[in-house]
Image: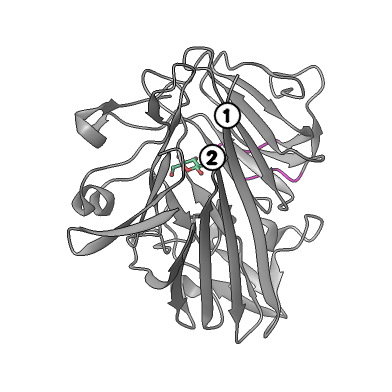
Amino acid sequence: MTIRKNAFGEYDIFTIENASGAYVRILSLGAAVQSIAVPDKRGELTDVVLGYDTPAEYLSNDGYFGAFVGRYANRIANASFTLDGRVYKLTANEGKNTLHGGRGLSKRRFELISAENNRLTLGITDPDGGDGFQGVVNIRVTYEFSDDNKLGICYEAVSDADTYLNLTNHSYFNLSGRGDILGHELMINADNYLPVDTELIPTGEVRPVAGTEFDFRTLREIRNGFYDHCFVLHGTPCAELYSTESGIAMTVETDMPAVQFYAGGATGVRLGKNGTVYGKNSALCLETQYYPDSPNRPDFPSPLLRKGEKYASQTSYKFSVE
Ligand code: BGC
């Protein structure tokens, strides 16, 4: 097992390759997952995530391809919340709301903390008041790629003041390595989902999936591409995804309470890695996280990180062939 470091413009790209030759590539730019190349049913390596070949494309494009997302994944209504009696004003970057932390951490440079065997740890410090959030927050993210093709992502953080923190990874998966994800089969281990308003802010209701198009409790085909919703997790695994075309299956596990299933409906046409054209529904995201807008919803599980306490969370994506 080796980790190679190469230049990626002014940034670094780290390749974690396992014993079989499968590999993941991680950037110091946004701690983004740039590639996940795993064998398909013919034994050929297939890159199952969207990404770009240059830093300029990561810096100028929307969509958060493969990115580390923080301080707050998903939306916070009206770019504000109240904590301990004080009102905090955040960076509004989607109309009047905050998406993925505002300016966020996804286009920032992460520092190399360690690279050993199959584990890569990157770190970033966000100053007090970053995007309006309280506290200096020290964040570490560790990527571990095993010989059985499992990418583990471990998030750790501490803050010197009470703050809200909700960290995720925004990889876009296409297990066929081409075309679109309509026809992929999906299971989400959720009995309930969160209905949203026209600005994709949860209404507050937690609604059963039974009898709706949000019922993915057993593996079934994704038939339309409008999904952009938070599912309340019921147990483990969190989700399973399968492409009959490549035979590649992915199992997602997490200790987070929810997962945002985004079918990539807003991905505008652009050129990606190796000149591949990406567009609507080219790939989908399964972003493990706290519920959207939780700082304004005391009835949702709390993403509050108290001063000096340790934030720790894990999510893994395991690939196999069926
Ligand atoms: C959001 C989508 C958004 C996408 C890219 C997802 O996490 O749920 O609404 O279009 O990120 O920004």
Would residue 104 be visible to someone looking at this image?
Answer: yes
> Residue at the location (45% across, 78% down)?
125
* Measured Cα–Cα span from mark 2 to mark 1: 7 Å
- What is the secondary structure assignment of the residue under circle 1? strand
| Among numbered discs 2 and 1, the one appearing first in the sequence | 2
Residue 50 position (above or below residue 90): above
> Residue at the location (53% across, 55% down)?
144
Q: Residues within 10 Å of mark 1 (few under 14, many from 20)?
A: some
Is the residue under label 1 in contact with that under label 2 (CB below 8 Å)?
yes
Q: Quick check: 94 left or right of 167? A: left
Q: Position of residue 17 (x, y in %)?
A: 41, 47
Magenta span of residues: 195-204
Residue 119 position (above or below residue 25): below
Residue 248 magenta: no
Q: Position of residue 76 (x, y in %)?
A: 58, 57
Amino acid type of the residue that numbered disc 1 sits on in the rendered structure: Ser
Residue 57 position (above or below residue 46): below
To which residue does mark 1 refer?
A: 320
Q: Position of residue 44 (x, y in %)?
A: 39, 23
Q: Quick check: 315 left or right of 146? A: right
Q: Position of residue 39 (x, y in %)?
A: 45, 28
To which residue does mark 2 refer?
A: 149
